[in-house]
Amino acid sequence: MFVSRLFSTLVFVVSFTTMAHASPVTHTTLDNGLEIVVIEDRRAPVVVHMVWYRVGAADEPPLQSGIAHFLEHLMFKGTETMAPGEFSSVVEANGGRDNAFTSWDYTGYFQRVAADRLELMMEMEADRMQNLSFTEAEWLPERDVILEERGQVLESRVGAQFNEAMLAALFKEHPYGVPIIGWRHDMAVLTDEMAMDFYAAHYGPNNAILVIAGDVDTDEALALARQHYGAIPANPAIAPVERPTEPPHLAERRVVMEDARVGNPYVSRIYLAPPRRSGDQGEAAALQMLAALLGGSSTTSVLERRLTFDEGIALSAWASYMGTMRDYGMFMLGITPVEGVSLSDAEAALDRVVAEFLEEGIDPEQFERVRHQIRASEIFGLDDMQGRARQYGVGLSIGLTVEDVEGWIDAIDAVTPEDVLAAGQMLLDKRASVTGHLMRPQTAELSQ
């Protein structure tokens, strides 16, 4: 897993007609602070029920890295009325599936079930929002589970360990540099008291978003939400969490990692970048277009075309942008060179092609082709009920609005080539970046 009854009136209800042929979206907030998004999609008798908490790994107390993810696991260990594991067992017995996830900025819990089981999901989720309960027999073995998970998904994978080292070097003070799953030495001493303190400080309707998507009538879904979530009192302990701000980045950082497990050595670079900002998504949209132009296609993007096909020095080259984070975004570049090309030469070639792209400008036909591809991908994504629900959950969790989520395609449409080139100027300043070389040990290289 790795993000009652209503006594109050609704503060506001705003309905939106989404882009293209998408079904209507209703957004409402209860007096206890719970935000609700309802997305009607009547094509199949299925519903997705999600609860998102605006808290994640970036909000953890000192010396407790991993506590947000640990609590996510413990949320399945029972309540005052439900036995350990009963939550998932009930979901499965009703033909559904459930899971949860933790990010730096949010923790999410979801179920996908037949539409007539929605009320049951609300009843159980509302219960564990306020009545979490477990004993040492549940929490202590679960700590071993998360330690094993770290070993399986991170420590056994050299690429994951490399990324962990890169992020730790990129963020000098902000907690995005701490792995979501936690550092092993912190995880090994997490306790039930720490988990319950984190739960008490951050879980409650006034720090949560309920997203319902699928074969539902909006009025009926809201009535059920009033019944099961509305009477939960706001948690008075919840307060804005102060996060550190990154100091000025005055020098580029470099990470060199050697490991005998490395198959193909590669160069990776991560830049500190702006995230999507509510009310003004233009810069984020320009960065999204920049990433797509440079590395969005394995055959036609600038980096692949130049470095892989024209010059033949790369097995692959890539670019991507991560803007759905609350405080900072990240822009990534990378190259895997062919045999016989050193990582230093590959890095130099990567820098050269990026600089030439920014100097020569953008081919208008390529620009429009890429824009249409992004737009088509976003519109096709409206057909994925769970993916669409996730868009709203992520967006509201990081400080965007429903209007921002709905306006993302419009932001992409408004981007100009000049906007993309202006956004790309950050790629010429390595001071806000970390560059990593992942390679096999030199002794292994010499012995081959």
Image (spheres, rainbow, N blue to C red):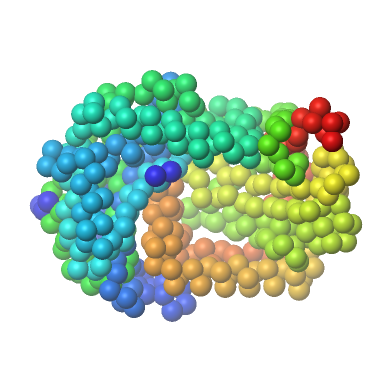
> Residue at left 56%, top 69%?
377
Q: Which quadrant is the N terminus positioned in? A: top left
- Viewer-proximal residue, 385 or 112? 112
Residue lying farthest to the front in this orientation = 448
Residue 278, percent from left and from top: 48, 53
> Residue at left 75%, top 36%?
439
Q: Is residue 107 above or below residue 410?
A: above
Q: Is residue 291 above or below residue 246?
A: below
> Residue at left 38%, top 20%?
189
Residue 269, percent from left and from top: 71, 41
Residue 26 appears in the rendering: no
Residue 88, percent from left and from top: 26, 50
63 on left or right of 301: left
Q: Is residue 416 above or below residue 330?
A: below
Q: Is residue 314 above or below residue 192?
A: below
- Viewer-proximal residue, 370 or 190? 190
392 on left or right of 298: left
